[in-house]
């Protein structure tokens, strides 16, 4: 088994952290790494990396450079570089990315597109 996801996330290197007690709704955009530990509902559009904590509950359409999650996400996810799903991750939605890493125990229910083509074109 690969130890790719066994690295510890250094929270000191992350510019902004939305703490466990935060319950936020809306459109979230950012250019520096961000971590969500609480609840978020809406849309996330980022040019940087997104880290999702183990107790986080996200219901959103997500676009970011790299997405690393230990929490729950309901919604479609698009990453320009990579998506990392740790063992505690639970994803309900479609994933689009060039590189996907799933740790044993992660749950993913949806469609995975690693070719870069939109799903509609592939189905025709």
Image (tube, rainbow, N blue to C red):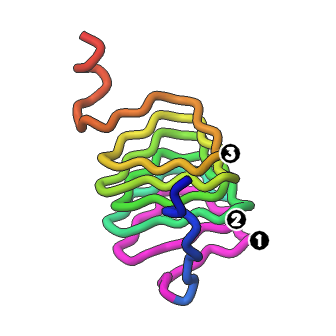
- The mark that comes first in sequence, 3 or 1, is 1
Q: Answer whether labels 3 and 2 touch (C-beta < 8 Å).
A: no
Q: Residue at x 26, y 29 (%)?
A: 118
Q: Secondary structure at mark 1?
A: loop
Residue tagged 3: 105
Q: Answer whether labels 3 and 1 touch (C-beta < 8 Å).
A: no
Figure check: 95 above or below 121: below
- The mark that comes first in sequence, 3 or 2, is 2
Viewer-side label of 3, 2: 3
Direction from residue 45 to residue 118 in the image, left or right = left
For marks 2 and 1, give the CA distance.
6 Å
- Magenta residues? 13-38
- The mark that comes first in sequence, 2 or 1, is 1
Q: Position of residue 91 (x, y in %)?
A: 60, 41
Q: Secondary structure at mark 3?
A: loop
Q: Position of residue 124 (x, y in %)?
A: 24, 10
Figure check: 8 above or below 28: below
Q: Position of residue 58 (x, y in %)?
A: 62, 52
Residue tagged 2: 38
Q: Residue furthest front?
A: 1
Closer to us: 98 or 32 = 98
Q: Residue at x 37, y 63 (%)?
A: 46
For marks 3 and 2, give the CA distance.
22 Å
Q: Secondary structure at mark 2?
A: loop
Closer to us: 7 or 42 = 7
For marks 3 and 1, give the CA distance.
26 Å
Q: Answer whether labels 2 and 1 touch (C-beta < 8 Å).
A: yes
* The image quarter in which residue 21 lies: bottom right
Viewer-side label of 3, 1: 3
Residue tagged 1: 21
Please tell me how crowded label 1 is: few (under 14), some (14-19), or many (20+) other residues with Cα within 10 Å.
few
User: Can residue 114 be found in the magenta stretch?
Assistant: no
């Amino acid at each position: 088994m690969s130890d790719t996801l066994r690295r510890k996330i250094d929270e000191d290197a992350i510019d902004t952290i939305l703490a466990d007690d935060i319950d936020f709704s809306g459109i979230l955009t950012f250019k520096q790494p961000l971590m969500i530990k609480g609840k978020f509902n809406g849309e996330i559009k980022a040019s940087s990396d997104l880290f999702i904590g183990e107790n986080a509950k996200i219901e959103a359409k997500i676009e970011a450079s790299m997405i690393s999650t230990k929490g729950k996400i309901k919604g479609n996810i698009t990453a320009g570089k990579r998506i990392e799903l740790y063992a505690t991750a639970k994803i309900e939605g479609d994933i689009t990315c060039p590189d996907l890493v799933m740790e044993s125990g992660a749950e993913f229910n949806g469609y995975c597109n690693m070719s870069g083509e939109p799903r509609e074109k592939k189905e025709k």
